[in-house]
Image (cartoon, grey):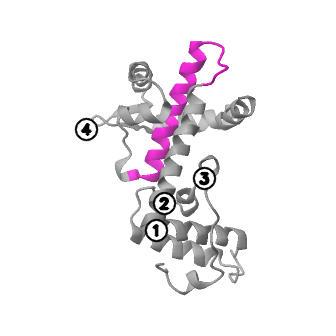
């Protein structure tokens, strides 16, 4: 087991088994991209662990510290990280599928609106976690949202015409500043995640 310095030797815990239905987002916890290299994981972990260590009187947080240690223990070992990534990616697909394909949608227009928001959410997350390469191919959107490419053509057409999405030179799609503002405003006003939770509860 690779350690990240003295701070990693304190209160080290053995994480429990991770199930597909309840996979913790270790990347979000460490505030790093899922494509982050080992050196980045170690550097960010050490910084956050020092900040939230229980001995830190200003910013110490024992619960957060234990979560950080667990995340680092998983992501710093290639074999365990590979196993975690399988569950993590599957849960991401399930999450986006649930938003973009509400079983109880009243009409196709409502479904299309949900698909648009889901596409923006995917592109938003990619840009936020990987600023240097924030684009996504349509094929990846198809897999993440569960929508056929033919359906996504209309969605992408609308979003590009509105200026919410731009097509890069390599044909990848990326969210624009207007797209970010629109998505964030929609979340604040209408609570997309609340609708997702309500859909899951009713299913």
How far apart are the two marked residues, 2 and 3, measured between alpha carbons? 16 Å
Mark 2 crowdedness (10 Å alpha carbons): few <14, some 14-19, many ≥20: some
Main secondary structure of the magenta stretch: helix
Task: Decide whether residue 86 is among the magenta residues.
Answer: no
* Residue under pointer 3: 23
* Residue under pointer 2: 32
Across and down, in percent, residue 199 comes to: 69, 30
How far apart are the two marked residues, 1 and 2, measured between alpha carbons? 7 Å
Q: Secondary structure at mark 1?
A: helix
Q: Quadrant of residue 104?
A: top right
How far apart are the two marked residues, 2 and 4, measured between alpha carbons? 25 Å
Mark 1 crowdedness (10 Å alpha carbons): few <14, some 14-19, many ≥20: many
* Residue under pointer 4: 170
Task: Decide whether residue 113 is among the magenta residues.
Answer: yes
Across and down, in percent, residue 86 comes to: 48, 51
- Compared to residue 55, the image places residue 168 above or below, namely above
Is the C-beta separation of discs 1 and 2 under 8 Å?
A: yes
Q: Residue at x 52, y 39 (%)?
A: 93
Q: Quadrant of residue 152?
A: top left
Q: Which mark is nearer the camera, 2 or 3?
A: 3
Q: Which mark is residue 41?
A: 1
Across and down, in percent, residue 117 comes to: 54, 30
Of the 4 image quadrants, the one containing the C terminus is top right
């Amino acid at each position: 087991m690779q350690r990240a310095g003295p701070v990693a030797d304190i209160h080290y815990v053995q994480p429990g088994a991770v199930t597909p239905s309840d996979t913790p987002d270790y990347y979000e916890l460490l505030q790093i991209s899922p494509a982050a290299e080992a050196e980045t994981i170690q550097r960010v972990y050490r910084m956050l662990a020092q900040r939230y260590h229980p001995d830190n009187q200003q910013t110490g947080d024992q619960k957060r510290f234990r979560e950080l240690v667990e995340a680092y223990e998983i992501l710093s070992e290639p074999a365990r990280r590979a196993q975690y990534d399988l569950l993590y990616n599957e849960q991401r697909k399930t999450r986006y599928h649930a938003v973009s394909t509400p079983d109880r949608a009243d009409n196709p227009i409502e479904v299309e609106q949900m698909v648009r928001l889901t596409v923006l959410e995917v592109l938003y997350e990619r840009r936020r976690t990987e600023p240097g390469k924030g684009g996504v191919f349509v094929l990846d959107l198809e897999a993440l949202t569960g929508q056929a490419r033919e359906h996504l053509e209309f969605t992408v057409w609308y979003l590009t015409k509105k200026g919410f999405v731009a097509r890069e030179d390599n044909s990848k799609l990326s969210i624009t500043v207007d797209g970010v503002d629109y998505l964030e405003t929609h979340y604040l006003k209408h609570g997309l995640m609340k609708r997702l939770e309500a859909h899951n509860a009713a299913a």
